[in-house]
Image: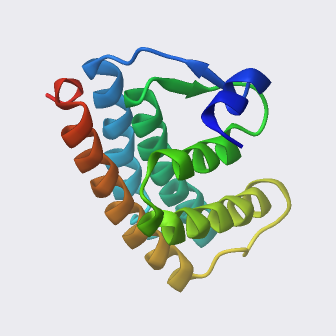
Amino acid sequence: MSLQEFLASGRLKRHKASAQDIGKLFAVVKRDLADAQVKGLSEDRRFTIAYNAALQAGRALLAAEGYRTAGQGHHHTVFQALRLLMDQEHRHVLDYLDDCRSKRNLADYLGTEVASEQEVAELVQEAKMFSSLLHDLIRKRHPSLLK
């Protein structure tokens, strides 16, 4: 699906982001990366928090590029739309995060003990690298949106 098809289907809307919008999204990323490492929380909860950090970083790049998600399935839309906005070399991380989206759904809606400690550690590391990558892309493409 192209960006135009996402827009036509209503899954994406045009959006003009401000530096404040982008800053707020990256503040959530920073908070969630820290919270995902808090011992004492269940692995499932830490996994969903780490996943949310990556999701919010994705939303920041979408916003910087002039889009926001709308309607149902917005998590899926974020990662599918990012495939169109990022280089092919990053496809593997988008595949990984989409797999994490599915696991997050299981943890949130269907059960407990879905994520292992190793999976949480891996996702935290991937979310850190992903958010840094997207921050750098925004700085390169839209420097006025980062203070």
* Residue 123 vs residue 61, the one in the foreground: 61
Q: Is residue 118 above or below residue 58?
A: below
Q: Is residue 74 above or below residue 99?
A: above
Name the residue located 76 percent from the left edge and 69 percent from the top edge.
112
* Residue 113 vs residue 147, the one in the foreground: 147
Name the residue located 39 percent from the left edge and 66 percent from the top edge.
37
Q: Is residue 143 above or below residue 33?
A: above
> Quadrant of residue 22 in the image?
top left
Across and down, in percent, residue 38 comes to 40, 64
Across and down, in percent, residue 106 comes to 79, 63
In the image: residue 76, left or right of residue 82:
right
Across and down, in percent, residue 91 comes to 52, 65
What quarter of the picture does the N terminus occupy? top right
What quarter of the picture does the C terminus occupy? top left
Tell me the colour scheme of the image. rainbow
Name the residue located 44 percent from the left edge and 65 percent from the top edge.
90
Name the residue located 38 percent from the left edge and 18 percent from the top edge.
17
- Residue 35 shows up from this direction: yes
Q: Residue furthest right?
A: 110
* Number of marks in the rendered image: 0
> Quadrant of residue 51 in the image?
bottom right
- Residue 41 shows up from this direction: no
In the image: residue 53, left or right of residue 7:
left
Q: Residue furthest left?
A: 147
In the image: residue 110, left or right of residue 101:
right
Across and down, in percent, residue 131 comes to 35, 53
Q: Residue furthest bottom?
A: 118
